[in-house]
């Protein structure tokens, strides 16, 4: 079959689970993803709220070791807003273990960059590291970044300017609810009438978050603990050839409670050129109009919430 | 007799234009912070900020009255126009600013190399909320002070002050950003313009007020973000302080339009060793700046004179309430219960 994308095959990464799930569900999800031949990279680890990591670092490392056996690249993701000593220690422990296991970490805060560079562990600079220019990218690489995920709001056409002549690997957030912001306040606990300290892990009851919409009933956002996400998933499945041309080598799919295997297979087919962008998008929406299902404004340098036809 | 060591922090005051700068200095501000009239600062509002000439006059005015001037160059340099940011740092250095406030690591590296004697402060836009991150910025880029994000408890601030070699500055008063600044894309998600890339949040050009059936609808780029009953006070329509519906309940899902006010915590803040108290409000006029700065001047001096006998004066609260958007106050994330 004629491949539409002549470049080296793009890798597919399963991003860190951003929602709060019970550990059994997390294990089941990642083990099933490890069995998928379409997956190249697995990011494992809590990014949003340290209170969700009930069994601590050991549990995560054990699962990471199991995932490693599948032959996939495993990356240990770290917290985006660590503020307590306990959270910093969690990052130190994970990073030290990553070094011993031959893994990398995903840094989502400068604390992780600091720890990784101190321990000599390579890292992926996650989407919250604010790499908007080539100079910023160079500084991040100088400190040990081997791969970067650029800010979600950066227009795709600007990727080549940011990357320049750097040989750093570029990963693109290609599908999923957009992680838009972080707060000190837990909005999931708040919407259940609870405080963050006494949250009773209510996020485990909402595996795809809680919908927040406007007073005139238009969709807006998804509440995910201390994080606010886009209500509609973003997708760039119909722009993969263009992304390859911009130098993107890895596509990140952000985990959701349902439909991940199907999303993954459509992405693989599109990335391998077995489906055209339009056909892949149509497969993903099940024939429904894309503007009713997804957003992609950020890809085009527009409002993130809108859908722009290609 | 107190056994606690107290640090008397500087009052770091906002100026969106020259009259506001003069008002801040005249009202007793130790330091004024400002930005140039371009996307290089996080308050890139129409009709605000300083030209080179205005900044020069402002710095001369402040220095002649023993006040300092910090220049914020605290958004992210863009992919194709990074020179706009480096030239802003150069201008701050040439004009004799006392410090530059920066968040981006490439710009910090530039400032360190080109202007080693110009103090570098880490902006709140860097979202550095722990001492590991702060020490990294100190070691790599020689920063001297960090402005902490408004998501920390006072306990966390105390710990950072004790473990970090840096001077620590915290927000004390004014508009309350409830998200980790620098890691918030809500504004660009709705309007296309963001603090990181454009220096704006919920920009005025996207705001529309629509009166309908005895109610006032506020829309941001066409999206309904608030609805007011007749006579209800409406503050500036910031996205995260709008009314939405979640889990079957309508209201301020993210945050009510409260202003930050930590007057009641001043002795604890002094004891923590905080070196700068930042007053928000570069978008506000000289009257606001004069009222707020003189109130805080009185409070800080009272606390420094007698920290153990310090009590918040009613007239301080009254004058701050009169100037605040929405009229209501909170100590925000500094107290755990808020979270």
Image (cartoon, coloured by chain):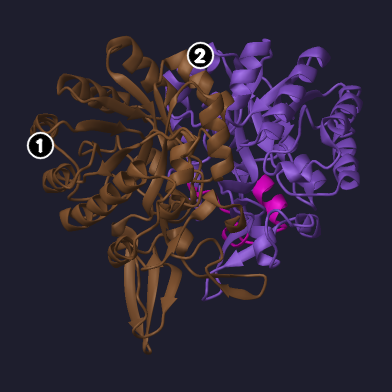
Disc number placed over residue A167 in the picture, else none: none
Residue B172: percent from left, percent from top = 39, 48
- A210 vs B253, left or right, is right
The chain that hosts pointer 1 is B
Residue located beneath label 2 in the image: A166
10 Å crowding of disc 1: few (<14), some (14-19), many (20+): some
Q: Residue at x 13, y 29 (%)?
A: B63
- B163 vs B191, left or right, is right
Q: Give the quarter of the image for residue A33.
A: top right
Residue located beneath label 1 in the image: B54
Residue B114: percent from left, percent from top = 28, 11
* Residue stretch in magenta: A279-297
For label 1, the SS is helix
The chain that hosts pointer 2 is A
Q: Residue at x 46, y 62 (%)?
A: B241
Tell me: residue A267, above or below residue A213. Answer: above
Residue A109: percent from left, percent from top = 58, 30
10 Å crowding of disc 2: few (<14), some (14-19), many (20+): few
- Residue A127 or B290: which is nearer the viewer? B290
What chain is the brown one?
A: B
Q: Residue at x 91, y 45 (%)?
A: A24
Which hue is chain A drawn in?
A: purple
Q: Nearer the viewer, mark 1 or mark 2?
A: 1
Q: Give the quarter of the image for residue A100.
A: top right
Residue A160 visible in the snapshot? yes
Residue A197: percent from left, percent from top = 71, 53
The quadrant the C terminus of chain B occupies is: bottom right
Residue A307 visible in the snapshot? no
Q: Residue at x 22, y 42 (%)?
A: B29
Question: Which residue ends up furthest to the bottom in the rendered image?
Answer: B213
């Amino acid at each position: 079959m004629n491949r539409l994308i002549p470049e080296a095959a793009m890798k597919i990464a399963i991003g860190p689970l951003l929602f709060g799930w019970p550990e059994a569900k997390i294990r089941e999800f990642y083990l099933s993803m490890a069995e998928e031949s379409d997956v190249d990279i697995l990011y494992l680890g809590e990014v949003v709220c340290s209170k969700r990591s009930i069994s601590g670092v050991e549990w995560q490392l054990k699962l990471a070791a199991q995932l490693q056996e599948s032959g996939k690249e495993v990356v240990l993701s770290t917290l985006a807003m660590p503020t307590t000593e306990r959270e910093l220690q969690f990052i130190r422990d994970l990073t030290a273990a990553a070094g011993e296991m031959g893994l990398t970490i995903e840094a989502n805060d400068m604390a992780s960059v600091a720890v990784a560079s101190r321990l000599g562990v390579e890292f992926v600079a996650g989407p919250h590291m604010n790499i908007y220019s080539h100079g910023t990218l160079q500084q991040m690489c100088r400190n040990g970044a081997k791969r970067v995920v650029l800010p979600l709001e950066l227009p795709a056409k600007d990727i080549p300017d940011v990357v320049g002549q750097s040989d750093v690997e570029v990963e693109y957030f290609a599908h999923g609810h957009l992680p838009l912001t972080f707060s000190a306040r837990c909005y999931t606990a708040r919407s259940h009438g609870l405080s963050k300290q006494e949250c009773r892990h209510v996020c485990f009851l909402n595996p795809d978050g809680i919908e927040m919409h406007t007073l005139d009933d238009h969709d807006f956002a998804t509440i995910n603990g201390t994080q606010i996400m886009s209500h509609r998933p973003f997708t760039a499945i119909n722009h993969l050839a263009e992304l390859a041309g911009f130098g993107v080598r890895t596509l990140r799919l952000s985990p959701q409670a349902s439909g991940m295997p199907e999303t993954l297979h459509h992405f693989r087919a599109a990335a391998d050129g077995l489906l055209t962008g339009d056909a892949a998008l149509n497969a993903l929406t099940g024939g429904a109009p894309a503007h009713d299902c997804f957003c992609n404004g950020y890809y085009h340098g527009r409002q993130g919430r809108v859908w722009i036809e290609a | 007799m107190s056994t606690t060591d107290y640090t008397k922090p500087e009052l770091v005051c906002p100026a969106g234009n020259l009259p506001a700068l003069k008002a801040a200095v005249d009202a007793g501000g130790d330091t004024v912070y400002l930005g140039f009239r371009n996307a290089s600062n996080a308050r890139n509002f129409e009709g605000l900020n300083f030209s080179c000439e205005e900044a020069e006059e402002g710095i001369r005015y402040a220095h002649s009255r023993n006040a300092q001037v910090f220049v914020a160059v605290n958004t992210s340099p863009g992919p194709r126009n990074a020179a706009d940011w480096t030239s802003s740092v150069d201008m701050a250095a040439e004009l004799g600013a006392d410090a530059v406030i920066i968040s981006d690591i490439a710009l910090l590296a530039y400032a360190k190399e080109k202007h080693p004697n110009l103090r570098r402060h880490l902006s709140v836009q860097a979202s550095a909320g722990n001492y590991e991150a702060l020490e990294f910025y100190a070691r790599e880029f020689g920063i001297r002070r960090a402005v902490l994000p408004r998501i920390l408890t006072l306990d966390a601030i105390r710990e950072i002050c004790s473990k970090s070699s840096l001077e620590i500055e915290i927000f004390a008063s004014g508009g309350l950003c409830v998200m980790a600044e620098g890691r918030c894309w809500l504004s660009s998600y709705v309007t296309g313009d963001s603090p990181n890339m454009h220096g704006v949040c919920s920009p005025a050009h996207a705001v529309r007020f629509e009166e309908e059936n005895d109610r006032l609808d506020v829309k941001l780029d066409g999206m309904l973000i608030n609805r007011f009953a007749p006579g209800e006070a409406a503050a500036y329509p910031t996205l995260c302080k709008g009314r939405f519906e979640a889990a079957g309940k309508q209201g301020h899902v993210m945050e009510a339009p409260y202003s930050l006010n930590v007057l009641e915590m001043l002795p604890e803040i002094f004891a923590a060793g905080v070196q700068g108290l930042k007053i928000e409000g570069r978008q506000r006029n000289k009257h606001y700046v004069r009222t707020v700065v003189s109130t805080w001047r009185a409070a800080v001096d009272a606390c420094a004179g007698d920290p153990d006998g310090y009590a918040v004066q009613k007239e301080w609260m009254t004058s701050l309430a009169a100037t605040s958007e929405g009229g209501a106050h909170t100590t925000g994330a500094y107290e755990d219960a808020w979270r």
